[in-house]
Image: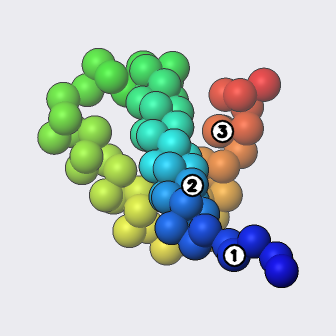
Amino acid sequence: MRKPRDYDAELKALEDKARELRTRKVQQLGELVIATGADQLSTDELAGALVAIAETKETAKREAWAKRGVMFFE
């Protein structure tokens, strides 16, 4: 007979992995803010700028920002 699967252990392992990925994402976003110099902005300024960017639906603006981002990372 086969050994039964330990679903609780598998679920815990997945939850741990998800937590690790969320932590890594937050850390990388913080590093990006620092690398771009945006850490010099106040929290309100940074949040306002990010909200404005997220709300922008204009494809041309978004493409221009993407190109500038690519140039930043090169």
Badge 2 is on which residue?
A: 13
The amino acid type of the residue labelled 2 equals Ala
Please report the residue visible at 78 percent of the width from the left and 25 percent of the height from the top: 74
Please report the residue visible at 28 percent of the width from the left and 39 percent of the height from the top: 46
> Disc 3 or 2, which lies upstream in sequence?
2
Q: Position of residue 72 (x, y in %)?
A: 67, 28
SS for callout 2: helix
Q: How far apart are marks 3 and 1 (CA)?
A: 53 Å
Q: Distance between the residues labelled 3 and 2?
A: 39 Å
Q: Where is residue 33 in the image (x, y as percent from the top left)?
A: 43, 29
> Disc 3 or 1, which lies upstream in sequence?
1
* Left or right placement of residue 4 versus residue 22 in this view: right
Depth check, front residue: 24 or 51: 24
Depth check, front residue: 69 or 61: 69
Q: Position of residue 19 (x, y in %)?
A: 46, 49
Depth check, front residue: 12 or 22: 12
SS for callout 1: loop
Quadrant assignment for the N terminus: bottom right
* Left or right placement of residue 40 versus residue 54 in this view: left
Examine the image and state in which quarter residue 73 appears. top right
**Display coloring:** rainbow
Badge 3 is on which residue?
A: 68
For residue 4, the mark is: 1
Q: How far apart are marks 1 and 2 (CA)?
A: 17 Å
Label 1 environment density (alpha carbons within 10 Å; few <14, some 14–19, many ≥20): few
Q: Which of marks 3 and 2 is in front?
A: 2
Examine the image and state in which quarter residue 9 appears. bottom right
